[in-house]
Amino acid sequence: MTIEARRATTVEGIPHEYLDYAISANRQEDRLNIRGINVYAPRAFKATTMLVGSNESSVALATGWIDPWNVVAAGDLKNFSIVAPLRTPMGINIVLWNLAKNPQIRHLGVWASDELDRTSRGSAGREYLESLWNNGIEEDGTIRGTAFKLLPELVEDGGIEIIRQIIEKVRLHDFSNQEKSALGQIARGLQEEGSYMTPYSFKEFEIRAPDSFPSEEAGLEIREKHLFDAWLRLVDRIMRYGKMRELETGGALVREIEFARVVIEGEDLENFHLPDYIEGIGELRITRDSLDSYFREKILPDSRLVEIYPGVYRFERGESRYLYSELMFFYPRDKGIDQAVHWIYKNNGLEAAYEYLSNNHTVSEERINTAREVMNNTGIEAEQKVGILLEIFIPPVNQVEKAIERIKTTPADADKTFILWDPATHGVQDRGRPCLVYASLLVRDGRVDMQTTWRSHDIAKGWPDNLYGMLRLQEYIAKETGNKRGYLLATSESAHIYQADVSWMEKIWREHLVDKKLKKVFHDESEADPRGNVNITVVGNEIVLVLQDPETASPLTTFRGTFKDVYYMLKKLDLLSNHSHLMDVGSELQKAEMCRLLGIPYVQDKPIDFRNLRQGG
């Protein structure tokens, strides 16, 4: 590449006196030979700001986060072979690749005294590099003393031995306490002749998807209109960000994210959105009928109620350790009460048991009359009567009924809560504990909103049924209280997919989300930002951004200034929430900034018209 060509294609921002030494960001290759120095600068790994000095120098310099032309004077570049920023731990891979290809480099200096270099994240690259030289490397490429692992391209095919030879023969120097003006002289004093090994070429780096992408790790949130759109997004979060963990139940392996939160905003149950592909998944066996059946059998209590006396019912769980229908509609009384009453009956007789119950538990006159009927009924055995009296005087708690009563009497209060977890029972069990542990309701603006908390959540096979059941319960409560159903929120403390389900779930995930044909259109229903719309104009020498009400377009607030002024105010106040909207606003602000600086008209959501500039206007 000629000097003139490099000058023409070098990225802006490089001082003119450094252009002859800079590697163009617009180059077509990642591997170059410049003045006898073999350079590997992979663009995909952001290696775009290298300076190449003299092939007679045995000193290379890593400049931390700051660009190299801000550290080394142009006149001193003859004392260095390569000067490039290290920045992140990933930069260590690029350093090693270039050292292996240029074994005449015997000294590697680090100058990391910029402001970002002193932060915990900004100093990680330098600290890991020092750990590599001081502590060495494991066979799998992990730098000892850290959790950081070098790229496979450096480790495979005997690469570990090459790396060990490099860290043995190349001396690492920390120049961070030195003045920048002194670096050239220091490098002159370190020069040596000769190579310590034959040049070695590692493979070029590939972008490989990891088993798990980095993320916030806890509290990932999803907002969707429809249940199965939310489910697919939740599956995406687990497949992309989940980590393999051992679940407490039998030590099963799961792919898990922590405290995932899903908000379903507008599912229409009368016209329920069940995607066609869902019914074709054999492992799920989900249909509209199966979802309705789950609600009737697992959420509503009717199928489990047995009438033991006219108007008196007992919930029979069968062999199940728990059922949501029981815990919400017929929360069991303490077993100790049953034992105490039966003890009174066996030791003091039926009358004593009745007296204890009637004197210590307040019930309606109607139920007292029923209890008296039971006592006088000669066709029922005494021990049977004790069981019926217990159901009359101390019936299970119908938490749903109580919540409905509270909504009718005190709708504004935040006191409508279902508790499904019993510390005395579930807190000491290893198995058979409810996954749904808590649900609460708020009535706002004529809307019943529900928040649910799930201790452990099988997202592949349990989540769709669970959330559909709660939507139907929410609708039932809303109708009983004369309100409309609002938001359903579900927090899954352990949102996971069992290892046995990962392969078929991955197929669904890829087919219906990752590899699905991209539609480059704006969907108002799913992508509109609930926090507002944005109107951007350029007035004089200022960008003017007006945040508008999403329903009425009424102005809410205004920001003025340059791109950075407006951008940082939006960021500081966290005024927008939808990711696609944020990306669109960012691109529009950048367009507005270009038009502001060039003095040409800006029209939001329209391409920039450069014709006047091309014509010299």
Image (spheres, rainbow, N blue to C red):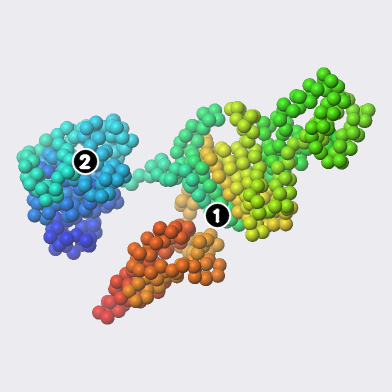
x 48%, y 38%: residue: 255
The three-letter amino acid code for the residue at tag 2 is Leu
Residue 58 position in % (x across, y down): 10, 42
Closer to the camera, 121 or 241? 121
The three-letter amino acid code for the residue at tag 1 is Glu
Which label lies toward us, 1 or 2? Answer: 1
Q: How many numbered marks does the figure carry?
A: 2
Per the image, label 2 sits on a secondary structure element best described as helix
CA gap, disc 1 and disc 2: 46 Å
Residue 197 position in % (x across, y down): 13, 36
Quadrant location of the N terminus?
bottom left
x 33%, y 46%: residue: 207
Per the image, label 1 sits on a secondary structure element best described as strand
The answer to whether residue 351 is seen in the rendering is: yes
Residue 331 position in % (x across, y down): 71, 37
Closer to the camera, 499 or 433? 433
Closer to the camera, 353 or 536? 353
Q: Residue 358: which disc?
A: none
Q: In the rendered view, would you say 87 is above or below 362?
A: below
Q: Which residue is mark 2?
A: 96
From the viewer's perspective, is 524 left or right of 324? Answer: left
Q: Residue 224: which disc?
A: 1
Residue 434 position in % (x across, y down): 62, 35
Closer to the camera, 26 or 570? 570
